[in-house]
Image (cartoon, rainbow, N blue to C red):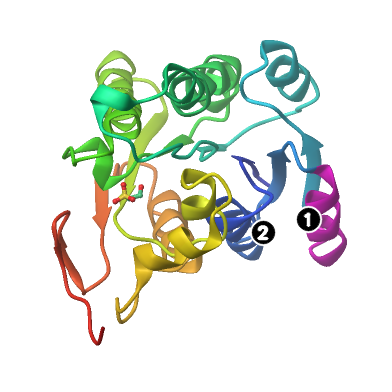
Amino acid sequence: MRRTAVVTGASSGIGEATARRLAGEGYDVVAGARRRDRLDKLAAEVPSITPVTLDVTSQESVDALAGALDRCDVLVNNAGGALGLEPVAGARLDDWQRMYDTNVLGSLRMTQALLPRLIASGDGVLVMLTSTAGLVSYEGGGGYCAAKHAQTSMVETLRLELVGQPVRIVEIAPGMVRSEGFAVTRFRGDEAAAARVYEGVPDPLTSDDVADAIAWTVTRPAHVNIDRMVIRPRAQAAQHKLHRVGG
Ligand code: 8X3
């Protein structure tokens, strides 16, 4: 029996790397994202990946994905991201709304839609991609930190509510990851500003590093729940303690 993993935000970055990695671990992977052209390329490369057009901000889109699934053993709630780096006093309401809708409500929609199948699998794993921004706040991060804190709270609540059911609830909280798109989206397409985030940092984490951690947590024996994994590059001792060289 082949197991099925659903990965959201799978068209790039951590989501794409996770889809590839779980396919390598023997899962049939349902890769969901809005950018269908990128998913099609991914699926052409990896036969056990099925592309599905998915917008986690749309209940209809989430329901369509869930309705087409025979089974679901693993759900990776990865879709989301950061918008803007303004202080709270000058933040844009629509950025906060968008971040809440993708990161938080998107994860809620997916979780509600697939939880029955995760439980029915007999050993379901729900993986929530939060961030170190879900554990500590930083200047300019207000809206993103609030959304990530909400996801952290959601996984803690789920674990309590579902104890005794055959489903594991895992939180992956990465620090600095140089993933395609994350910083560029945060800076509204300003590639130079995005590049400055990583300037001089010897080795930020890669999407593959995070996918590796996700794969490890989901492939533990059924009784082993990795509650939370915080992963940072060696050069980042804490949110504000980043080692940069040169410059
Ligand atoms: C990404 C980590 O430090 O940019 O989730 O918020 S940070």
The circle drawn on residue 48 is: 1
Q: Give the range drawn in magenta.
A: 36-47
Q: Overall secondary structure of the magenta stretch?
A: helix
Residue 130 in view, yes or no = yes
At numbered mark 2, what does the secondary structure look like: helix, strand or loop? helix
Check whether the beta carbons of the residues at disc 2 and disc 1 lie within 8 A of each other: yes
Q: Which residue is drawn at 49% across and 19% down?
A: 94
Q: Which amino acid does label 2 sit on?
A: Ala
Label 2 Cα neighbours within 10 Å, binned few <14 / some 14-19 / many ≥20 = many
Residue behind mark 2: 23
The circle drawn on residue 87 is: none
- As drawn, 150 above or below 186: above
At numbered mark 1, what does the secondary structure look like: helix, strand or loop? loop
Residue 227 in view, yes or no = no
Q: Quadrant of residue 43?
A: bottom right
User: In the image, is residue 43 part of the stretch drawn in magenta?
Assistant: yes
- As drawn, 97 above or below 86: above
Q: Pick the residue in front: 152 or 49.
A: 152
Q: Which residue is drawn at 50% across and 61% down?
A: 179
